[in-house]
Image (spheres, rainbow, N blue to C red):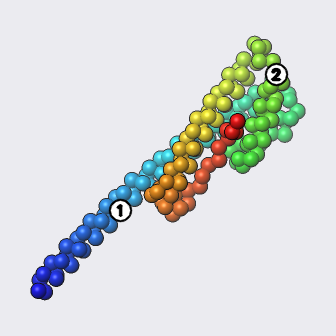
Amino acid sequence: MFLRTLNILFEISFMVFVFVGLIAVASVFIVRHLQNEFKKAYRVQSRFDIELRKLLNIMHNFHEIDSLKKYRHLVIKKLSHDEKQVILRTLEHAYKGIDLDDEDNAYIVETYNRLQEVRRDRDSKVIIYNDKLSIFPFNIYARIIKFEKFIVYSRKE
């Protein structure tokens, strides 16, 4: 009787140990996956900041637009999402005011199109990352690691 009880306790302990081991292994893979998704979104955010700065500099240097003058010496990467959104709207407004068919503006048009492409790429990666943060079991680990959601730049039209 005592051996049988001891055997049952041993089997239960072994099953619990295996179950905890599986959870630990799964946790490593889940955390690694979340970190990779965060890195993808962060990398494309950096590319977006670079393209935004480049377009801002080019448009200010070629056309000396007064509305862009106040953003000339800002560090884009350190700005909040709302401030970048204001700069993006200001750039879009200034872009509409230039002659797109002029040969001198070809580089501005190319840079603007690249910025829009990077913005769409960033938004798609951010949407994927944000969706992962809201799905079980990723949401539990995201709260533990304190991953925060990114904000999308695209406007719903």
Say which element carries label 2. loop
- Nearest to the observer: residue 77 or residue 147: 147
Amino acid type of disc 2?
Ile
Q: Position of residue 127 (x, y in %)?
A: 57, 44
Q: CA distance from mark 2 to mark 1?
A: 58 Å
Mark 1: amino acid: Ile
Assign a secondary structure to mark 1: helix
Position above or below: 93 against 45: above
Residue that mark 1 sits on: 23
Is 75 left, or right, of 43 in this rendering? right
Say whether residue 115 is visible.
yes
Residue at 24% over, 74% down: 13
| Residue at image mark 2 | 98
Assess disc 2: are there few (<14), some (14-19) or many (≥20) residues with their C-alpha within 10 Å of its C-alpha: some
Callout 1: few (<14), some (14-19), or many (20+) C-alpha neighbours within 10 Å? few
Residue 30: x %, y % from top left? 42, 54
Q: Can residue 38 be seen at all in this image of the molecule? A: no
- In the image, residue 27 sits, relative to residue 14, either above or below, namely above
**Vertical placement of residue 19 versus 55, above or below:** below
Q: Which mark is residue 82?
A: none
Instruction: Please determine whether, in this image, residue 59 is positioned above or below residue 46.
Output: above
Which residue is found at the position 83% from the left and 35% from the top?
Answer: 68
How many numbered discs?
2
* Residue 114 in picture, x, y percent from top left: 64, 27
